[in-house]
């Protein structure tokens, strides 16, 4: 049956069609919907989990693949950094079943910290990579990825990008799925225990094997050549679709598309470059294919001019689009696109940086810390999640943001170097489990002076509300015992742990003052559910007492608060009745409604 | 059918559902359909777009500039922000009610959307609707996404039948909200039909 699904859905359905036995991952835009889609389709016999982080997910999946099962692990590109340790070793050891590592890249970046290129990671780990251009291709290619993994006994990377993950298309979904039968783990310590001798021997084998895979890839259907002539566009991933959009109706341009960047299909490329004098590489993120083509041209002394990112004809940063690609290619081929934007006379547009939602409990948590620490020298270390948006004016409560879990450890670092500063680390509940916990032990052990603020909204909000160990639900659909963050903190040696409702502003401010006054490692758990998970029917309203001072707007920056004719009004479709503004109002002009 | 439709607005306005209904209906009517959405951090009060591409001529998930034949703008400044996508002589259905970003409320630049609608009028064929007014009978502006679909359909600009679109609404909306969403769509449809007749009689 044909269904209209997201690219990530197509990857999930392809994995089910390939008979996946185990799928594990950690949420991260643009990869999160893969695991979620599997959970929504019949998947009896498949073990499905949100792991606490990507490293855990990878190790769970590696074991499954050692058992002969077909395993998949999903993450975003930076998640692969976290999972790099097990992956690099697993690449040496190899697998018995299949291990497909889905690592979704995010050119732009749109929802990420870096513009790193997973194809380069595949090269670094010396394992194959597949790079789909559309959801339809992703559905087919993920199945190929399982087959290649099993055929060559190696982990395989599957690298979609945001515009593939979040594009929708009609996919023919099979009526039934059934997990593959597999043998189970067979002990063989000469094979499954990584030792220097094994690594040395396998290193040589892997490089020879990669030559075989490169040959195999040279006849892979998605590595394709269209058109003829001395001018070529070499492309990959979603950029292939932008290239096609541009080249429609242009004869005499050869389009060479590489869907398997590593091991590079050299024979395919040599044939494709036959008769080509000038080529331009259109790819996102790093100039990976461009470098491979240059290498190839050097070794084979081809007389072809190769352009791309390395000679700055194509931008290194940002995502491609149909228009950006047309502009670059138009300039290169001397036929600028027919369409030129003509709205330079448009009125200036309001800017819309992303902000915390109206009623978000994180706003209240940040505000409480800000109020409690007024006049004190502080550093506020942020982390990865919705609450990074606490950096926006007027809250301005995120001084640093580096990577998952860094809030706690960086606050610790500052406590050692800036001794006159009160150091705070803000971490979300899911981030706490993902990589915050080790930092807590580190802080306790190394005698740091930090206040850890766990912003516990009982979900993984930014990536679409996935459950985590603190929520009491897992992806097998089971109710499980909640892992109690306060107990975890106490167990790790944090002497003072306070749990407070951030919407109770006075209590929250008092808790911050109390903890900040103590030395050592202290923790405050600001507990209040995400407004998108626990819906509130409450609303706040402004009465005639409003003096138009706009203190509520200036202090809180809640998107539900705007002005009309000099007075504050509350957008009732956005307001959740959290009441924070009523506590800030000096005129007592804001009240609750429906608060029963 | 080959048709590119751009939906734009502010995160939280329900653009994604509108896009899914349009794409689902086009697929139901036997077309090849692709679409692309803004998901993730940008959703939190930021500018969002959905690109719905119907037909076998669409190669990429994003509509190239100057190709969209219909724009559904949930906010006046977002309509202006995305005008580059619209083909000359195409229709823009535009909500006149502004969403004021927090930055504007802080800086008090006086953004109220009026300058945007005046500009749009000069550049394109537009149907303006005020979400506050059209949503009043339904008790929440949350129904605007369905109403604007109705307007476009009523104006005969979606290229899809009323019935197919209603069937998609039934399929994608939770049962207890089905009837009110159907009513919202039909209310929009009536507005669209009126606008169409008005134009034809000009």
Image (cartoon, coloured by chain):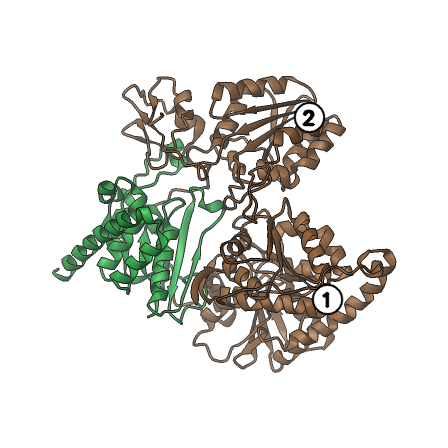
Expressed as whole percent of the image width and height from the top left, the position of residue A85 reads 73, 51
- Give me the chain letter of mark 2: A
Which of the two labelled residues, at mark 2 and mark 1, occupies the earlier sequence position?
1
Q: Which residue is under mark 1? A: A153
The quadrant of the rendering that contains the C terminus of chain A is: top left
Circle 1: is it few (<14), some (14-19), or many (20+) Cα within 10 Å? some
Identify which residue, A576 or A24, lies in the foreground: A24
Identify which residue, A390 or A20, lies in the foreground: A20
Expressed as whole percent of the image width and height from the top left, the position of residue A127 reads 70, 63
Q: Which residue is under mark 2? A: A494
Chain with colour brown in the figure: A
Expressed as whole percent of the image width and height from the top left, the position of residue A156 reads 67, 63
| Label 2 secondary element | loop
The correct choice, above or below, for A357 with respect to A588 in the image is below
The quadrant of the rendering that contains the N terminus of chain A is: bottom left
Q: Residue furthest right?
A: A197
Q: In this view, does B34 lie to the left or right of A279?
A: left
| Label 1 secondary element | loop
> In 3D space, how far apart are the residues under numbered discs 2 and 1 (Cα atoms)?
45 Å
Give residue A586's quadrant in the image: top left
Q: Which residue lies furthest to the left in this view?
A: B201
Q: How many marks?
A: 2
Q: Residue at x 25, y 61 (%)?
A: B162
The correct choice, above or below, for A135 with respect to A541 in the image is below
The correct choice, above or below, for A147 with respect to A526 in the image is below
Identify which residue, B126 or A501, lies in the foreground: A501
Chain with colour green in the figure: B
Query: Residues at marks 2 and 1, common chain?
Result: yes
Q: Is residue A222 left or right of residue A92?
A: left
């Amino acid at each position: 049956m044909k269904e209209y699904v997201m690219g990530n859905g197509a990857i999930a359905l392809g994995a089910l069609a390939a008979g996946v036995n185990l799928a594990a991952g950690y949420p991260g835009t643009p990869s999160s919907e893969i695991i979620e889609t599997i959970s929504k389709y019949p998947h009896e016999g498949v073990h499905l989990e949100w792991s606490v982080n990507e490293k855990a997910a990878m190790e769970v999946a590696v074991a499954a693949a050692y058992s002969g099962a077909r395993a998949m692990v999903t993450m975003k590109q930076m998640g692969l950094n976290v999972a790099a340790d097990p992956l690099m070793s697993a690449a040496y050891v190899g697998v018995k079943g299949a291990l497909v590592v889905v690592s979704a890249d995010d050119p732009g970046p749109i929802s990420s910290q870096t513009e790193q290129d997973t194809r380069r990671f595949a090269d670094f780990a010396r394992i194959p990579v597949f790079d789909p251009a559309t959801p339809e291709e992703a559905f087919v290619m993920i199945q190929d990825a399982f087959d290649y993994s099993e055929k060559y006994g190696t982990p395989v990377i599957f690298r979609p990008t945001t515009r593939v993950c979040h594009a929708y298309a009609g996919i023919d979904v099979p009526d039934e799925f059934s997990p593959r039968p597999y043998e189970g783990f067979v002990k063989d310590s000469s094979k499954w225990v990584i030792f220097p001798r094994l690594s040395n021997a396998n290193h040589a084998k892997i490089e020879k094997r990669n030559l075989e895979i490169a040959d195999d890839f040279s006849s892979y259907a998605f590595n394709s050549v269209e058109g003829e002539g001395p001018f070529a566009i070499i492309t990959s991933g979603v950029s292939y679709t932008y290239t096609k959009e541009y080249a429609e109706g242009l004869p005499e341009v050869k389009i060479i598309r590489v869907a398997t960047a590593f091991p590079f299909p050299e024979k395919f490329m040599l044939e494709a470059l036959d008769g080509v004098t000038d080529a331009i590489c259109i790819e996102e993120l790093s100039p990976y294919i461009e470098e491979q083509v240059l290498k190839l041209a050097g070794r084979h002394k081809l007389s072809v001019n190769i352009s791309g990112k390395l000679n700055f004809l194509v931008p290194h940063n940002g995502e491609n689009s149909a228009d950006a690609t047309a502009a670059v290619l138009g300039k290169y081929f001397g036929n600028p696109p027919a369409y030129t934007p003509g709205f330079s006379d448009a009125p200036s547009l309001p800017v819309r940086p992303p902000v915390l939602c109206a009623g978000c409990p994180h706003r209240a948590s940040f505000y409480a810390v800000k109020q409690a620490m007024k006049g004190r020298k502080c550093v506020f270390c942020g982390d990865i999640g919705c609450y990074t948006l606490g950096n926006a004016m007027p809250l301005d409560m995120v001084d640093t943001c580096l990577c998952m879990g860094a809030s706690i450890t960086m606050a610790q670092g500052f406590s050692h170097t800036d001794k006159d500063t009160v150091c705070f680390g803000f971490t979300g509940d899911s981030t706490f489990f993902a990589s915050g916990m080790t930092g807590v032990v580190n802080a306790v052990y190394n005698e740091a002076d930090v206040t850890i603020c766990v912003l516990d909204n009982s979900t993984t909000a930014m990536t679409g509300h996935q459950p985590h160990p603190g929520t009491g639900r897992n992806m097998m659909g089971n109710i499980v015992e909640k892992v109690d963050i306060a107990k975890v903190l106490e167990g790790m040696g944090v002497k003072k742990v306070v749990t407070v409702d951030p919407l109770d502003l006075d209590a929250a401010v008092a808790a911050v003052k109390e903890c900040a006054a103590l030395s050592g490692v202290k923790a405050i758990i600001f507990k209040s559910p995400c407004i998108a998970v626990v819906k509130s029917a409450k609303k706040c309203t402004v009465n005639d007492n409003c003096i138009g001072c706009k203190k509520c707007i200036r202090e809180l920056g809640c998107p539900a608060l705007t002005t009309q004719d000099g007075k504050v009004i509350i957008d009732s479709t956005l307001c959740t009745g959290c009441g924070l503004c009523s506590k800030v109002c000096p005129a007592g002009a804001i009240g609750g409604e429906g608060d029963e | 059918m080959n048709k590119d439709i751009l939906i734009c607005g502010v995160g939280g306005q329900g653009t994604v559902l509108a896009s899914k209904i349009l794409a689902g209906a086009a697929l139901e009517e036997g077309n090849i359909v692709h679409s692309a959405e803004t998901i993730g951090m940008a959703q939190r009060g930021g500018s969002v777009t959905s690109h719905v591409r119907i037909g076998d001529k669409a190669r990429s998930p994003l509509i190239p500039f100057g190709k969209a034949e219909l724009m559904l703008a949930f906010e006046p400044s977002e309509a202006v922000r995305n005008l580059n996508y619209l083909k000359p002589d195409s229709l823009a259905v535009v909500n006149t009610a502004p969403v004021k970003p927090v930055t504007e409320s802080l800086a008090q630049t006086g953004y109220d959307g009026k300058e945007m609608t005046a500009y749009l009028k000069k550049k394109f064929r537009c149907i303006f609707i005020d979400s506050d007014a059209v949503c009043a009978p339904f008790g929440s502006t949350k129904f605007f996404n369905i109403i604007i679909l109705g307007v476009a359909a009523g104006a005969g600009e979606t290229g899809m039948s009323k019935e197919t679109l209603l069937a998609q609404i039934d399929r994608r909306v939770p049962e207890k909200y089905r009837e009110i969403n159907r009513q919202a769509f039909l209310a929009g449809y009536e507005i669209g039909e009126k606008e169409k007749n008005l134009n034809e009689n000009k």
